[in-house]
Image (tube, grey):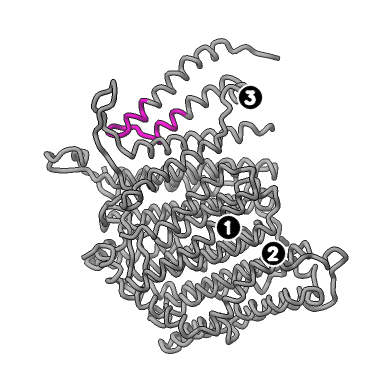
Amino acid sequence: MKTNYVMLHTITRIVALIVLSFSVYLFFAGHYTPGGGFIGGLMFACGLLLLYLSFDLNKITTVLPIDFEKVIAIGLLIGIGTGLNSLLFGDPFLTMYFDYYDVWLLGEVGLTTTTPFAIAIFLVVVGVALLTILTIAGDEA
Amino acid sequence: MELLMIILIGIIFSVSTYLMLTNSLLRVIFGIVMLSHGAHLLLLTLSGFNDGAPPLLGEEASVYMDPLPQALILTAIVISFGVTAFLLVLGYRTYRAHETDKMDQLRGNADE
Amino acid sequence: MNNLLLVPVVAPFLIGTILILFKNHHRTQRVISAVTAIIMLVFAFYITYEVYVNGIQTVELGTWVPPFGIVLVADLFASLMVILSSIVGVVCLFFAFQTISPEREKFFFYPFYMFLLAGVHGAFLTGDLFNLFVFFEVMLIASYILIVHGGTKYQLRESFKYVVINVFASIFFIVGIAYIYGITGTLNMAQIAERVGELEQTGVLNAIAVLFLLVFGMKGALFPLYFWLPNSYFGPPSAIAALFGGLLTKVGIYAIIRTFTLIFTHDPGFTHNLILFLAGGTMFFGVLGAVAQFDFKRILSYHIISQVGYMALGLGLYSQLAIAGAIYYIAHHIIVKPALFLFCGATEKITGTTDLKKMSGLLKTYPVLGWLFLVTAISLAGIPPLSGFFSKFALILDGIDQGRYFIVFISLLVGILTLFSMMKIFIYVFWGEESLKGEQRRQPLMPLLMPILPLVALTVILGFGAEPIFSFSMDVANELLEPANYINAVLKE
């Protein structure tokens, strides 16, 4: 029997959008205030999970054809890469660089090499969380 | 506060010991998760509570919080997050392969 | 500051990550991982040379000066361990190329192999207690995946126990770290060592020392806590079992030796005697387990336990000669044990079983395999002039010097029982009526033997070249017994 979850689908569309955008906010807030790559990544994974739960697994997989194994790999590569770039300047591994730049339209922005590292954590957390859950969910009992 | 935390940690440890000694595979995993929470709280407690300003933001305050335990706990939480995820999948696969979640049936044969 | 130390830690991690992207290209994965493993071995030798010439090398991650930041430290002991683990890494990798089935290869075998090496090297090189925990976890999580790799029914069941035991130990590692941080306020091992010296609270420190002994003893399979090892090492294919048997327990032993020569030196009368007691139990009960078994892989797994006991014995005696003997023994063990596991893998590939009672008479068809096995096996048992003899000789000599006759007696008894069970394997597998049929007689042997040969050669070299190698071990032991050098090198005082 095919059931039509109108309420669930409508609410999910709105809530998922809020959750996903809040996760991005948390990610950027992380440098000085509570938040960061790990929390943001978990929240982002929750948002995506909400979509997977309310719609069908196969349907979301066709809309978002993401290979989460690759997401983890790319995240790890970015993370190691930000550590390694300090070797180019002759500093030890993982040295952090920080400076203020004038960016078009945004004015003065503080840019730091921890941001790519946080992106790396974000990607790895999203990848690991969803890969774990989808591995069990995709297993037809 | 310290005393309260120590008692709490004791309760968490005993609950997790109970869970780990039960016969169910899933409860063993829950026991492990509880135990790791207890250990993280212990790390927080033993490094000492004191009221103070957040470190590294200004130089006015007379007392600063020690940020290191929190960083360590975050790292430990991330690790236990990964391990728990792995354990759940492993437990699920074991359950599917053996069609039981009773630990005494997963004991193995004597002649193996 | 010496960024060279990062190579053994970061290179396998980076390469492992890249290998994830080549999921379906087995040949590419093999080539990349083989090249990385060999390059790592070269760098390991170079780092040791550098340490030997210029003294202890350090690198402060992120330019945070110790004790505030994480520091990687390479002293002679650590760099020697990195060399040994790189050798085993290369050899087991090449053996895996021959024996791992394509279905297993498909599921990220090589990436996790690399992550395991990264974790092991990190645990050897780190100078920070919490970082040691992190690298332990990197290593253990990779090992969880490799030990269940293939997902047979047996593996799933035993791996679950293996994982639970190890996670349990890791959580107690955090508890130990909490205690150490609570009383010393630092996690840098050099600074902990400095502050422990000033603390004069023997009771508290003893409690923490025992907690750490429990944690590392669980990972290194010491006496009451070894029960998880034989069953879980039986499951995975021989290439993995060889890598685990050679490396994983030794990381636990390394951590024990590091912490009990650097940090917990306040009351050797209690802590090191306790280690001595555990060493005796480990040796004796491990070898008794081996004697009772009739399975190639299980006998070898039980022997890991009994040999871990010898290493702990060296630390428990706590003199330069004994620690040098223990270090020599670790080197000998890391080379011989994987070789034996690989011989087990080779016979398994030929006969299709590891049960001793189901095979016999391999010597007629595969004489080279048989005699090479014999050489390695008697080296394990400690027959001169092979490497096993000199390490045990140093330990026993020092034991007699110190008047600890009982432990010397146990270790000699264990040596005899080891010889007995090695001979049991040799007689069952290689002597007697030939049991091989048809296809089994014509297995190509050379590809299987090629990775093992260097290990067999090394055990002979370690035996015949004992003089220079033993004097190197004495240097290492001397460095371990002088923690002031380590502290000064890290804290730059």
In the rendering, at what x and y percent does residue A70 appear?
Answer: 54, 37
Q: Secondary structure at mark 3?
A: helix
In the rendering, at what x and y percent does residue B89 appear?
Answer: 59, 41
- Residue at the disc numbered 1: C34
Q: Residue at x 50, y 39 (%)?
A: A72
Front: mark 1 or 2? 1
Magenta highlight range: A25-44
Front: mark 3 or 1? 1
Q: Amino acid at mark 3?
A: Asn
Numbered badge on residue C345: 2
Quadrant for the N terminus of chain C, please. Answer: bottom left
Q: Are marks 3 and 1 on the same chain?
A: no
Q: Nearer the viewer, residue B59 or A117?
A: A117
Q: Residue at x 60, y 62 (%)?
A: C92
Query: Which quarter of the figure has residue C450?
Result: bottom right
How busy is the neighbourhood of tag 1: few (under 14 within 10 Å), some, or many (20 plus)? some
Chain letter belonging to callout 1: C
Q: Which of pointers 1 and 2 lies earlier in the amino acid sequence?
A: 1
Q: Secondary structure at mark 2?
A: helix
Does residue B7 appear in this view? yes
Query: Which quarter of the figure has residue A114?
Result: top left
Query: Alpha-carbon distance for marks 3 and 1?
Result: 38 Å
Q: Residue at x 52, y 40 (%)?
A: B85
Q: Amino acid at mark 1?
A: Ala
Evaluate if marks 1 and 2 touch, with contact meaning CB atoms under 8 Å apart: no
Chain letter belonging to callout 3: A
Quadrant for the C terminus of chain C, please. Answer: bottom left
How busy is the neighbourhood of tag 3: few (under 14 within 10 Å), some, or many (20 plus)? few
Magenta segment main secondary structure: helix
Numbered badge on residue C52: none
- Residue at the disc numbered 3: A58
